[in-house]
Image (cartoon, rainbow, N blue to C red):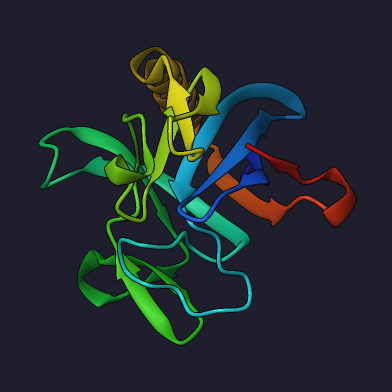
Amino acid sequence: MAETFEIEMVRRWFTERSTVSEVKIYGSHELFVLEDKDRPNGPKVSKQTCIPAGRYRVVRTQSARFGYVMPLVWNVALAGGRLLVRGEGKEFEGIRAHTGRTHLHTEGCLVVGRQRGVDKNGDGEVYESQAAYDVFDAKIAAAEAAHKEVWLTITRAPEAERLVC
């Protein structure tokens, strides 16, 4: 069994259009992630809601959209090398960790940042995204270079620990 590199993402801050999570690597705070709205009891809507909580592999692959190698989140490998997120009876392709600031930049993906806050409408935002992305991507690249499997576990904070942005 391969050695693993463990990333924990806990969804803690919720608004009508966004979800902000705290990300830890081996138990230490690393960064924040902004996603679209969390609908734990409703269906995943492409480019409008976040992926279901669960355990996912992360690999760095070439992104056709962004034009460079970047982290891809997946839990199903299909013939021909396609890597998908499958959940709630649906499949989604191209769930990436990338830079941005607001829920308008997520399109179902994970937008990383060093800091978190709220916009004028009360929705979650992340800041210092490029700096956070550079460190996060480098850690994943180093884990892959050391032949470690990179895993992301996404959970929701217990009700008592959830916070409003």
When the figure is inspected, residue 55 is found, relative to residue 151, above or below; the finding is below
Task: Name the side, left or right, on which 29 lies relative to 148.
Answer: right
Residue 120 placement (x, y as % from top left): 43, 30
Who's the residue at 64% across and 51% down the image?
153
Q: Which is nearer the eye, 29 or 142? A: 29
- Image point 58% across, 47% down: which residue? 151
Q: Image quadrant for the C terminus? A: top right
Q: Position of residue 73 (x, y in %)?
A: 42, 52
Instruction: Give coordinates of residue 146: x percent, y percent.
Output: 50, 27
Q: Is residue 30 left or right of residue 69?
A: right
Using the image, determine if residue 152 lies above or below residue 120: below
User: Is residue 126 placed above or below 61 in the rendered structure?
Assistant: above
Q: Residue at x 57, y 40 (%)?
A: 20
Residue sitting at 68 percent across and 30 percent down? Answer: 24
In percent of width and height, residue 92 lies at 33, 69
Q: Which quadrant of the figure has residue 164?
A: top right
Front-most of 160 and 30?
160
Marks counted in the figure total 0
